Amino acid sequence: GQNIDQPTEMTATEGAIVQINCTYQTSGFNGLFWYQQHAGEAPTFLSYNVLDGLEEKGRFSSFLSRSKGYSYLLLKELQMKDSASYLCAVRGADYKLSFGAGTTVTVRA
Amino acid sequence: DGGITQSPKYLFRKEGQNVTLSCEQNLNHDAMYWYRQDPGQGLRLIYYSQIVNDFQKGDIAEGYSVSREKKESFPLTVTSAQKNPTAFYLCASSIDLGGRASDTQYFGPGTRLTVL
């Protein structure tokens, strides 16, 4: 089976940095995705990691360690619009995605 | 503009009625998916299709049915056999069901189904 864990909630101040951790235990591994989802809307793709290391994309970065079954999403220079749920998803051996429950980030002024 | 559309955004039905949720994409993607999202839980896969006229059960297929008669369309029927149908339903598509970066799934806006 698939087991993906991420914190339920995080709060940070506008302009600060927040790191959302994701740990996983899955049957096979073919990549890890991060999505952003605002309340009542569709998840939108943020990042993809398949090799160990850091992928940077503007204010967002994602890190992967396959040996540790661990990833994090780093959000820098937080803005109010970054208040959303962040979903960690792992693509397993069957190429299907398994999702964590999501981390709700609240950005305060 | 290319994208995935789902309609309607909100849907209300009486208990015991079947209801069909639509999903259309013009991205020329081969693979399409249906997920269910409940509060406090991750997205769960209901059905997926890799190609026209073929589809596979996901993790929670009981009480649901699908068809894939056209590449662009993947409707989901929630039947009366589904015990807890009230949920947010998301459709997604990808170029293929594979391990490449380009096989990223993209989501439609979702349909919130409430069964009264």
Image (cartoon, coloured by chain):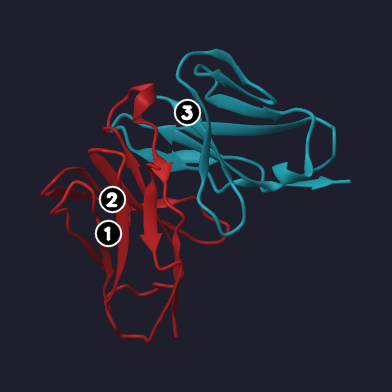
Indicate left or right for A43 with B56 as reference: right
Quarter of the figure with the N terminus of chain B? top left
Q: Residue at x 76, y 27 (%)?
A: A76
The image shows residue A22, relative to residue A82, as above or below, that is: above
Q: Type of residue at label 2?
A: Gly
Labels 2 and 3 share a subunit:
no
Labels 3 and 1 share a subunit:
no
Q: Secondary structure at mark 3?
A: strand
In depth, the one of A8 and B90 nearer the eye is B90
Residue A51: % across, % down: 47, 14
Circles 2 and 1: CB atoms closer than 8 Å: yes
Residue A32 shows which numbered tag? 3
Q: Residues within 10 Å of mark 3 (few under 14, many from 20)?
A: many
Which chain is indicated by disc 2? Answer: B
Label 1, on which residue?
Answer: B61
Q: Residue at x 78, y 35 (%)?
A: A78
Residue B84: % across, % down: 40, 73
Q: Which chain is red?
A: B
